[in-house]
Every structure is written in structure tokens, then in C-alpha cells.
Image (cartoon, rainbow, N blue to C red):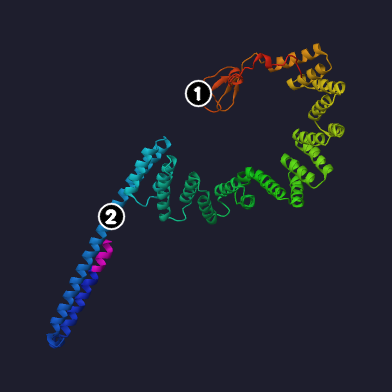
Amino acid sequence: MRLKTALSYALLIIIVIVIVRAAEENLEILESDFFAFGIPFKLSTALIFSLLFGFISFIVIAVGLGVNRFLSSWFLKFRERANKESETRYLKGMDAILGARPFEAIKHFKEAIALNPHSLPALIKIGDALRDIGKIEEAIVWHKKALNENPKHLQALYAMAEDYLKKGNFDEAKRWLEEIISIQPKRALYALRLLRNLYIKETNWYKAKEIQEKILRASVLEEEIKEDELYTVSIDYEIYSYLLSQNKIDEAILGLNSLKRNFPHFLPVYLRLAEALLLSGDESGALANYREGFLNCDSMVPLLFLEKLLLEKGEPDLCIKEYEEIIAEARNPVLPKFLLARLLSRQGFYQRAEQIFSEIESQYSPTPSLEYHLAKINERRQEYLKACSYYNEMWRMLKPEEFVFFCNHCGKEESFWKDFCQKCGKWGTFVSSLEKEFRFGPLPQEPVYYKKTLWTE
């Protein structure tokens, strides 16, 4: 800066010297007249006034630039001081947020914004704090101010989506989520998940599938979208179920078969496909699906559906045959054996049913269900002492004489009373099993002469 000033002064001196030298060599010319607007002046006088005007102009410009530089520096320091104080207020607001003091946080954020109206973090956080205390409309106003500062700011866009989700205005929430996705079509994983879940909530399965495909194509690590893969089969299952409800049976069967091949351990698809096959008249295909569902998913639910179907048709013998074939194929045949023995008992084949139940009991630890069915078989055969021994064993396993305590809030079970539930974090919620049994009032008493004297099963 000093060198620049010195050079400027040196240039001025040189210019003055040149002018003086030129004046000495042209004195006669300087004495001649110079006319301005018809008024005569000496040329020397005109030159002097011109130089004087130029000098004064130079001084005025230099002073103006200096004043401007001084004022700019002063405003810059003032703005830096205001921004620094605004940042201090913002940090105090964040401390209040972390300490669960939302009203104090709002006060600090407002102070930060008063010092710096363009503070995006403070504009966003004051909206978030207002939303947390239920003032959704005010939160939206502040978040819109943040978007006025930067319409493409992702944090502000997410804040707007959260506002409308909290408000229950899902259409508006979807609009903001789509705006985020348009900015980051392959990176906005959280926005894609929220949008997919909204469509699932609305049972708009085709739009949910469209978003699900975008999620699976997202440019993120595979570990981050691994949990989302489960939604693919569920959404497709709902789409084919919808087709079935619209009586588009052939399309539903085709899609469910494809889904079964790709996801062989997804239990609902076997039950829905069996339903579709029954509607199409293919009963043998439905039975095959129930068997396949049990063998692949190791769940007794398909067997219960199979049993219900055949018993309603009046074909218990075919049901017994199906159970026997399934037992021969199953890796773990205990479930179909139990259901077969139960069915045999109901059909009056007590000896064979007892044999199967006893076989299960010898291979596995006894259970209350096994003891109950063995007791019922012997009771029906009028072998009451044997039946009583099984009932006693069932009683011993169930231990009804011992109190069990349950949390009224979340259902957690404990063997003794506790003042605090570790599962749901509530105090004083445990009640005994006896209290749960008698939580309803006693039944109204009937007159004695209405009661039957003979016991019937």
C-alpha cells in the first residue's frame, strides 16, 4: 500500500514538472485568448482553473474512497461481532435442546436470529424446537424462512417434511420428500424410505413398489439397504393379494408362484397361493402348497389350514393320509405328528393317538399340551386314574398355585413382583396372575332351581 502511494505521488510530481516545462516553452500561446461560451479568457487562466478542478476532484475522490474504506471496515467488524454473538446464542440453544429445555432453546435461537437474520442453522433449529412442543404451524413458518435463504438446503427440506408428517398432512409431506429426491435421486435414502412407508400406509402398493425399486438402486453401501430388501417380497405379496381381491385369479397365481420361487421361506405367499388355487378350482394344488409351506417354513400354520379345509369337506381320512406323508418328508416331524395324534383322538382312534403322543413324549421333554391330550384320551376311554395322572402332570407344569407377575403396560412376565419394569421403563405396573384372572367382576348368580343337576360334557 505504501509503495503504491509513493508511486502515485511520484507520478503527480512528474506530471507537474512536465506541465511547468511545457508552459515555459509556450508562454506566447498561454497569453492568447481562450473563449468559453463567448466569454474571453486567457489560455493560461483556463489551464490553471482546469488543473485546479482536477486537483480538487482528485482530493474529493481520494477522501471519498478513504471514508468508504473506513465505513466498510467498520461494518465488517460490526457484522463479524454480531455473527460471533449470534453463534454464541445458537450454541446456547443447542445446549438447551440437548438438555431437553425446548422453551429456553427457542429463546436463544430467536436472539441468534435477531443478531443474524440469515443464520440458516438457527432458523432450522428454532422450527425443530417448536415442532417438538407441538407448535407445528410456527415451525413451518420458520422452516420456510430457512428455505427462503437457500431453497435447496436439504436439512431445511427434511424439516418441512417432518413438520407435515407430524401435522398429519401426508400429501404435503410427500411433496417435500419428492423435492429432496429430485435433488439427490440416488442418495436420499432416508427420504425414499419415508416416502415408501407413506405409500404403504395408504396401501398404494404400486407407488410403494416404485419407490422400493429406487431404494434398491440407490448409490449407497449394500449394508445400508440390506434391511430394505425385506420390503420387496412384502410389497409384491400385497400387490398379488390385491389382484386376487379384484378376481384377477390367473394374474395373482402367476405372480405368487414367481414370488414363491424367489422367496421360498416367506410363509404368507404359500397361504395366499393356496387360496387363489382353491378359487380357481385346483384343490390338489392348494394342498400341495400347504405341504410345501410347512416343509420350507417349518410352521404349523399351513397344516392347520390344510386340516380345516379337509375337515370342512368331510374328509378326515384324507387329512390323516396327508399328515402321514408330511411326517415322512419332514426334517423335524414333531409338529405334524402332534397334529395327527390330535386329529386321531378327535376321530376316536384313541389307541393310535396315545401311541403317537407317547412317542413324542419319549423323544422330547413333556409339555402341558401333550399331557392334556393324553389325559383327554384316557378320560374318554374311562381310564380315570391314568387320566388324572396326566392332568396332575399338566398341573405341575403350569404351576397355577404359583403367582406370576405381569407388567400391565407391556406384558413383561416376572416370577416375583418388581417395582420397575426394565422393558417399558414404567413404575408400579406389575400385577399378579391372580389379579389378571379376577380382573372382571363376578358373574351374576342364577337361582338354584335353574341349575342343571346332571353333569354333561
Q: How many marks?
A: 2
**What secondary structure predominates along the stretch shown in magenta?**
helix
The image shows residue 111 at horizontal and vertical percentages of 33, 44
- Amino acid type shown at disc 2: Phe
Residue extent of the magenta highlight: 1-8
The residue identified by callout 1 is 427
7 drawn magenta: yes
Front residue of 449/441: it is 449
Residue at 67%, 44% in the rendered image: 234
344 drawn magenta: no
The residue identified by callout 2 is 75
Front residue of 224/377: it is 377
The image shows residue 358 at horizontal and vertical percentages of 82, 20
Residue at 23%, 62% in the rendered image: 66
Question: How many angstroms separate mark 1 from mark 2 (CA)?
Answer: 59 Å
Quadrant position of residue 101: top left
Above or below, 445 relative to 149: above
